[in-house]
Image (cartoon, grey):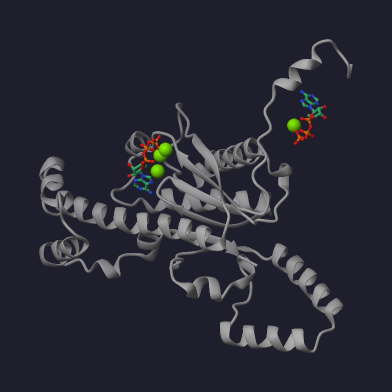
Amino acid sequence: MANSKFEYVKNFEQPDNLLLNTWIVVRIDGRGFTKFSSKYGFEKPNDRRALDLMNAAAQAVMYEIPEVTIAYGISDEYSFVFHKSCTLFERRSSKLVTTIVSTFSSYYIHLWSTYFPDTPLSPPLPSFDGRAVCYPSVQNLRDYMSWRQVDCHINNLYNTTFWALIQKGGMGNLEAEELLKGTYAADKNEILFSKFDINYNNEPEIYKKGSVLFRGYELVDPATHNAAAEADSLAEPVQQSKNQTENDKKRRAKARIVIEHLDIIKDEFWDRRPWLLS
Ligand code: ATP
Ligand code: ATP
Ligand code: MG
Ligand code: MG
Ligand code: MG
Ligand code: MG
């Protein structure tokens, strides 16, 4: 059975192992969600149920694939980060991407009725595409995360203003689009405030910042952390430090996955959770 004359076809497969010692980001995105969101009557600009469903599916992915250390979601997309030391599926890109995409899609459909109890799914069913990208440095990875969160902010400010003009201002789509052409962030804030009495700063954090998922673990005061680490290394027992590291790892793996809406651009988020990138 193992050595049939057909087996040579296996040699046509291309290796696709991702570069060692790099941070792997798998980003997935809903297929045709502009249409999908109107079919199921998503509230504009932000349907809270749809975001909660995305977050619940992403959380399930992180429970099923513990190698994912952090995830960040906005709109119909999610980014899943694998640690640079990860060896899952020998770092084969197609295995990593397809497993994330299918696990996420399965849970999205499985959990749909919890978030949309009155609107059952019907074909075409929701599906997601995915890609894997390697980032060689922590700076590159953080810039990637910042890029997504800036995108969230820009889109949300635009969409909030656009939909206020339509829903509260009685404008048509084209009219609103025309009015917003060439405007800066300050102009949109001003339109929201002066025309609609909306202070953008008071909009829900989940809309402004997106959602970040990670294993909940005690926060670190960066100042104390650095001092303690230094004292540790001076007083050695190297062996104990290693055990400590292993124990910490195990404890973290067991921790529950939390969903937060925090600034991931500034240093504070990362400084207070050094285990995410260490
Ligand atoms: P593609 O298949 O190329 O990704 P798409 O239609 O999904 O096409 P995107 O750029 O991914 O295009 O945009 C996602 C769309 O889904 C946007 O139109 C956005 O308004 C809508 N959408 C996603 N999540 C929500 C939500 N929670 N509430 C309202 N609309 C949403
Ligand atoms: P991997 O994640 O590496 O694919 P795996 O356990 O799925 O691991 P496969 O080589 O894909 O390994 O094997 C599929 C397994 O599923 C086999 O053990 C096979 O017997 C079982 N299986 C699949 N379909 C059926 C079926 N219809 N009836 C009984 N067993 C099945
Ligand atoms: Mg796309
Ligand atoms: Mg999409
Ligand atoms: Mg998208
Ligand atoms: Mg299998």
Q: Who is closer to the viewer here, 197 or 73?
A: 73
Question: In the rendered image, which quarter contains the N terminus?
Answer: top right
Q: Who is closer to the viewer here, 230 or 147?
A: 230
> Residue at the location (30% across, 53% down)?
155
- The spot of residue 196 in percent (x, y) is 14, 62
> Residue at the location (46% across, 60% down)?
143
> Residue at the location (60% across, 42% down)?
100
> Residue at the location (53% across, 40% down)?
131
- The spot of residue 266 in percent (x, y) is 44, 71
Would you place residue 93 above or below residue 253 in this image? above
Quarter of the view holding residue 233: bottom right
- The spot of residue 20 in percent (x, y) is 68, 49
- The spot of residue 154 in percent (x, y) is 30, 56
Ligand 1 - quadrant of the structure image: top left
Q: Who is closer to the viewer here, 176 or 139?
A: 139
Question: In the rendered image, which quarter contains the C terminus?
Answer: bottom right
Would you place residue 230 above or below residue 155 in this image? below
Total numbered labels placed on residues in the image: 0
Quarter of the view holding residue 37: top left
Residue extending farthest top? 5
Q: Who is closer to the viewer here, 199 or 1?
A: 1
Left or right of residue 224: residue 77: left
Left or right of residue 31: residue 86: right
Left or right of residue 75: residue 192: left
